[in-house]
Structure formats: structure tokens, C-alpha cells
Image (cartoon, helix red, strand yellow):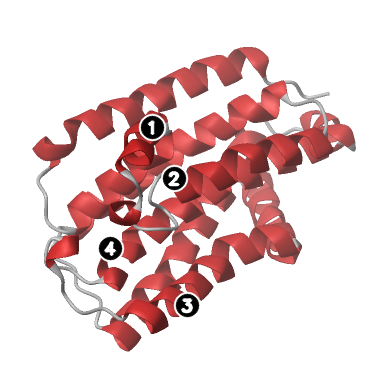
Amino acid sequence: MHGFWKLTWTEIKLFLREPMAAFFTLAFPLMMLFLFGSIYGNEPTPFFRGYGSVDVSVPAYTAMIVATSGLLGLPITMASYREQGILRRLKATPLRPQAILGAHVIVLFLMTALGMIPLVIAGKLVYGLRFNGDPLSVAAAFVLSSASFLALGFVLAGLLPTARTAQIVAMVLFYPMIFLSGAAIPREVLPEGIRQFAQVLPLSHVVTLLRGLWMGDPWGKHLGEVSILVALLMVGVLVSSKTFRWE
């Protein structure tokens, strides 16, 4: 276990030294919060079911951080490590392969959670953020969403051969997904046709689930989103176990 935690701590430090990963996980959602919060404020409106712009944006920005870790962080890091021979050298150590991959999952999960904390604090202190849900339910939805997108990230990490390819493919998937799913812009302002199309995007279900539970919806109202995310997690684990390569 000592080697596992030492590797985990090393990966945390490497993550924080990577400018792009740290920016998109920790700083970018906060910048979005202050930018749109200063423009639209947080007055309750029927347009958002009696909530304000910031109230609906904080769970949506949390979904954006989940996508950042799963679609950008994991595939690019794994492809880069494989390209540089780091994965091969790690596999030659006494650590088991599951422990090596588990360390990366823990780091990305911790960084994803760390990205959510300043959003909630800033939203509460600056804009009077409202929350009517059950904290344990929102935390469970956050864990499920993160696990599903990390599984998707492992699929991409197994299929994409180089770090450059991983970066291009990840961005092609990431940017349309965050703008069409409601993670960056409230879904209510998008045209109906785009909202219908966005239903095929997995991130749309993360946004819907987190927003709904944040506002106090029961789990029973979101069984469709839960089923899709559980299916994504199971398929992702199955496919990545067949396609992941160490070198």
C-alpha cells in the first residue's frame, strides 16, 4: 500500500503542475461562474423553475468538470504515458496493474471533487446559491457520473495511439458536448432542435441528473439518466478491459 499511495501522491503533484488540466478543472468553471453571474445575477425566475441563473449553473458546471476529467485528463495522460514508455516501466514495478490504474482514477476523482468545492463556496458567498436537494443524493450522483466518464476515458485511452491523437479526439468530443448538453450554457436558452439532439450525448444526462437532485427531485424522476450512466460505466469497463494497452 505504501507504493500505491506514493504513486497517487506523485500523480497529484504532476496533475497540479500540468497547466491545461489544472486550468480546465479548477479555474475555468469558476471563471464561467463569475462571468455569467455578473451578467445575469441570481434572481429567481420561472424560466428556471423558480431558481436563478447561478443556481442552475453550479451543478451544470460540475458536470463540465466531470467531462474535463474523463474526456480530456485521462485519455491524454494515459496516451502520453504510453508514448513515453512510462506505463511500461510502471508495469515492471512490484505494483499490480490495477493499483497503477486505480491511482489515476483516485487522482482524477479527487481533482474533480476539488473543482466543485470553490464553485459551491463562491456561489453561496457571492450569489446566495440555493440548494434544496439531499447532499448524499447529489454526492452519489456525482460519484456515478464521474465513474461513468472515467470509464469512457479509459476506452479512449485504449483506442487512441498517441498523445497528440488523444488530445485532438478528446477536444472534438469535449467542446460540442459541453455547449450542447447544458453544461456550459443553460439548456433552456438552446433551440428545441438542439435540445432534442443533445439527448444522445452522455453529458446531457449528467447535467439533468445533477440539476434535478440539486433542486430536490427524487431519484425516481431520474431513473432514465441513472440507467444510461450505469450502462455507460459497465460498457466502458468491459471495452477498456479488452482494449487497454500498456505499450
| Amino acid under disc 1 | Phe
**Which image quadrant for residue 155?**
top right
- Give the SS element for disc 3: helix
Distance, label 1 to label 2, CA atoms, is 8 Å
Q: Is 19 positioned to the left or the right of 146 in the image?
A: right
Task: For the residues labelled 4 and 3, say whether their Cβ atoms are less than 8 Å apart.
Answer: no
- Give the SS element for disc 4: helix
Task: For the residues labelled 2 and 3, say whether their Cβ atoms are less than 8 Å apart.
Answer: no
Image position of 50 with respect to 7: above or below: below
Q: Is 43 positioned to the left or the right of 218 in the image?
A: right
Q: Name the residue under label 4.
A: 56
| Viewer-side residue, 242 vs 188 | 188
Image position of 90 with respect to 137: above or below: above
Q: Earlier in the sequence, mark 2 or mark 3?
A: 3
The reply to whether residue 33 is visible in this rendering is yes
Q: Name the residue under label 2.
A: 180
Q: Earlier in the sequence, mark 4 or mark 3?
A: 3
x and y percentages locating residue 236 in the rendered image: 50, 23
- Give the SS element for disc 2: helix
Image position of 90 with respect to 215: above or below: above
Distance, label 3 to label 1, CA atoms, is 27 Å
x and y percentages locating residue 9 in the rendered image: 66, 57
Q: Name the residue under label 1.
A: 197
Q: Mark 3 points at which residue?
A: 35
Q: Which of marks 3 and 1 is nearer the N terminus?
A: 3
| Amino acid under disc 4 | Val
Label 3 vs label 1, nearer the camera: 1
Q: Earlier in the sequence, mark 4 or mark 2?
A: 4
